[in-house]
Image: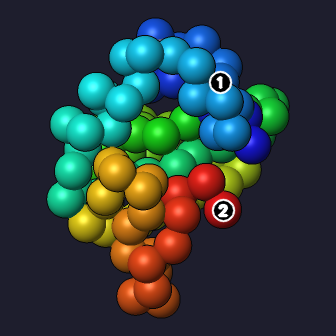
Amino acid sequence: MDFYCPPCLKIVNQQKLKCNKLATHFISLKGKRIWRIRYLNRYAYQYITECQYEELVRDQPLILANATYWDDFNPHDYTGLDAKGSRSSIFA
Ligand SMILES: [Zn+2]
């Protein structure tokens, strides 16, 4: 799965995770809600914070092809609690 690295917006693959800013960024989201979104006209996902998500849907409600969130994000194994209450990978 490909996604935009949040700090630098380069597209990275979750099996390679090449950007060295990425780990630091994900550690800053420890314990928080993390959203994964995809725009209609883009193939790569984006990971954003709860604040960013709220701003986004307030301004432009119909532009997303996909939006999922996880609570209590764990940056060590990249998991969080999904909407069903199960701990699952944010890359699944
Ligand atoms: Zn990066």
The amino acid pointed to by label 1 is Val
Q: x, y percentage for residue 14?
A: 64, 39
- Residue, x 80% and y 34% (percent of image)? 43
Q: Which residue is mark 2?
A: 92
Q: Is residue 54 visible?
A: no
Q: Nearer the viewer, residue 69 or 29?
A: 29
Quadrant containing the N terminus in the rendered view: top right
Side of 77 relative to 24 (left or right)? right
Name the quadrant containing residue 44. Answer: top right
Q: Determine if the C-beta at disc 1 is less than 8 A from ligand 1.
A: yes
- Residue, x 42% and y 56% (percent of image)? 77
- Residue, x 58% and y 19% (percent of image)? 18
Q: CA distance from mark 1 to mark 2?
A: 15 Å
Name the quadrant containing residue 80. Answer: bottom left
Q: x, y percentage for residue 8?
A: 46, 10
* Mark 2 residue element: loop
Q: Nearer the viewer, residue 21 or 59?
A: 21
Side of 48 relative to 66 (left or right)? left
Q: Nearer the viewer, residue 21 or 4?
A: 21
Label at residue 12: 1
Decide: few, some or many residues near mark 2? Use Cα within 10 Å; few <14, some 14-19, many ≥20: few
The amino acid pointed to by label 2 is Ala
Above or below, 40 relative to 85: above
Above or below, 32 relative to 43: below
- Residue, x 45% and y 86% (percent of image)? 86
Side of 57 relative to 2 (left or right)? left
Name the quadrant containing residue 32. Answer: bottom left
* Mark 1 residue element: strand
Q: x, y percentage for residue 92?
A: 66, 62
Side of 72 relative to 82 (left or right)? left
